[in-house]
Image (tube, rainbow, N blue to C red):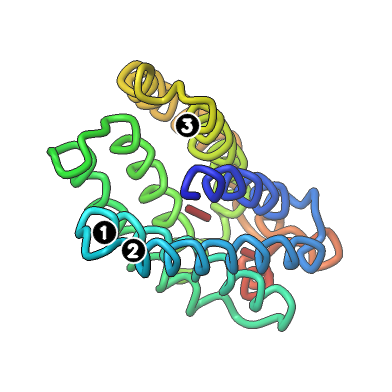
């Protein structure tokens, strides 16, 4: 069930990235955020109730709630036109939790270097949302959108496909290396190209996606 949920995490990250880039209207992105958010709340609840006291299963499920509540928060913000500050500070909290989950994957609890790197990607993404929404650094809106859309594929859709086809275990270590190198090159390269200054940093409400559009606008 976690692998299926990961596929839809990829879908919603891609959609939210397109929204922040101004390609998708903010309210049009709200329904999928609510659908995926609900999935990522129902799934871990089921996993916990069927874990029979397995602490690793419960720990794994707890990480899924971080996504579920993020997407529900985003969907509600988009529909209600709320200020994004609360979502931003929640994202800062989740970024710290994501680093902890990364360490659990790297250092023996889950023994999965691939997801160790993926959780670091998500920590970076949530940290960006903290900066854009919580600290109102609107010049990073488009950069955050690009990072979000890319992560939809490399941390969601691709690993989900490998998991669902039974190919993750044999490929997770090389994927971790490729992902680490790709992340440094791609995200560092995009920063000077997409960081903007002044009012143009924020797409209009009609286009879709200001940080106040994940209050009013919106990822990891």
Crowd band around label 1 with a 10 angstrom C-alpha radius: few (<14), some (14–19), many (20+) = some
Report the residue marked by disc 1: 59
Measured in 3D between alpha carbons, the distance from the residue under mark 3 to the one under mark 1, in whole angstroms, is 19 Å
Q: Is residue 96 above or below residue 188?
A: below
Sequence-earlier tag: 3 or 1? 1
Pointer 3 with pointer 2, Cβ within 8 A: no
Percent position of residue 188, x then y: 44, 31
Asked whether the residues under the numbered discs 2 and 1 touch, taking CB atoms below 8 Å apart as contact, a structural biologist would say yes
**In x, y percent, where is residue 25?**
81, 60
Q: Quadrant of residue 216?
A: bottom right
x and y percentages locating residue 156 in the rendered image: 53, 40
| Residue placed most toward the observer, 15 or 60 | 60
- At 53% from the left and 32% from the top, the residue drawn is 164
Residue annotated with mark 3: 163
Front residue of 50/129: it is 50
Residue 62: which disc? 2
In the picture, measured across the screen, residue 133 lies left or right of residue 100, that is right
């Amino acid at each position: 069930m976690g692998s299926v949920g990961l596929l839809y995490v990829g879908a919603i990250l891609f959609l939210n990235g397109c929204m922040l880039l101004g390609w998708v209207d903010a309210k049009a992105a709200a329904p999928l955020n609510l659908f995926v958010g609900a999935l990522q709340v129902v799934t871990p609840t089921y996993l916990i109730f069927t874990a029979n006291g397995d602490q690793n299963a419960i720990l794994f499920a707890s990480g899924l709630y971080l996504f579920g509540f993020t997407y529900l928060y985003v969907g509600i913000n988009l529909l209600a036109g709320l200020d994004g500050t609360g979502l931003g500070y929640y994202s800062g909290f989740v970024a710290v939790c994501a680093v902890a989950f990364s360490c659990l994957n790297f250092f023996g609890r889950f023994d999965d270097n691939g997801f160790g790197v993926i959780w670091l990607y998500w920590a970076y993404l949530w940290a960006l949302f903290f900066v854009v929404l919580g600290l109102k650094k609107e010049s990073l809106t488009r950069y955050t959108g690009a990072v979000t859309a890319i992560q939809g594929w490399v941390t969601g859709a691709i690993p989900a496909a490998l998991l669902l086809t039974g190919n993750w275990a044999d490929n997770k270590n090389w994927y971790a290396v490729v992902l680490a190198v790709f992340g440094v090159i791609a995200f560092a390269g995009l920063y000077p190209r997409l960081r903007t200054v002044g009012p143009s940093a924020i797409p209009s409400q009609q286009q879709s996606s200001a940080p106040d559009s994940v209050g009013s606008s919106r990822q990891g």
